[in-house]
Image (spheres, grey):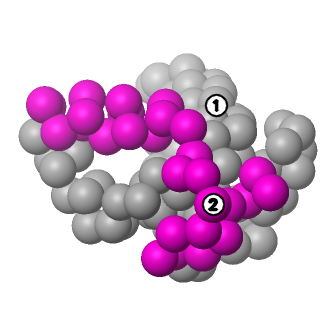
């Protein structure tokens, strides 16, 4: 999946917590999110208006980020509730490792494989 297509897909399915998301969809969106938030944060230093814009952009991307993260976990056969272990440092590392894993082959209880 291309960079532009993955961003479009994530924002199209911004509140969709069903189905599966490929690694490329997740990681391209995560890269775009990190770049945008990094740039906004750099400009936000010392500026109240830019800080507000940065916070609003973060809030606007919160639901799409959660949605693609849940769908990514579904792709490897895990429930989206596993994201709650990100509240611990060790859990965050485990979830990142899971998000790097390849798709579960074939169909699982969350839907068909998006690679096929």
The residue under the point 25% across, 58% down is: 82
Would you call the spot at circle 1 few (<14 residues within 10 Å), some (14-19), or many (20 or more)? few
Above or below, 70 against 101 in this view is below
Q: Furthest-front residue in view?
A: 106
Residue nearer the viewer, 101 or 54: 101
Q: Position of residue 67 (x, y in %)?
A: 52, 66
Gap between marks 2 and 1 measured at Cα: 27 Å
Up-down relation of residue 43 to residue 53 (above or below): above
Which label lies toward us, 2 or 1? 2
Give the x, y percent position of residue 6. 79, 49
Which one is earlier in the sequence, the residue at label 2 or at label 1?
1
Is 68 colored magenta in this rendering? Answer: no
Give the residues in magenta.
89-116
Confirm whether residue 59 shows in the render.
Answer: no
Q: Give SS at disc 1.
A: helix
Residue 9 is left or right of residue 62, and the answer is right
Work out which quarter of the rendered image holds the C terminus and state it. bottom right
Task: Say which residue label 1 marks.
Answer: 31
Residue at image mark 2 = 106
Q: Is residue 92 magenta?
A: yes
């Amino acid at each position: 999946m291309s960079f532009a297509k993955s961003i479009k897909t994530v924002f199209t399915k911004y509140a969709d917590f069903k189905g599966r998301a490929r690694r490329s969809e997740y990681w391209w969106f995560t890269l775009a999110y990190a770049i945008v938030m990094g740039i906004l944060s750099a400009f936000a230093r010392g500026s109240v208006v830019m800080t507000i814009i940065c916070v609003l952009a973060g809030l606007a991307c919160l639901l799409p980020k959660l949605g693609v993260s849940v769908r990514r976990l579904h792709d490897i056969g895990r429930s989206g509730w596993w994201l709650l272990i990100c509240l611990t440092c060790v859990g965050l590392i485990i979830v990142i490792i899971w998000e790097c894993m390849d798709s579960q082959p074939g169909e699982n209880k969350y839907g068909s494989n998006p690679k096929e």
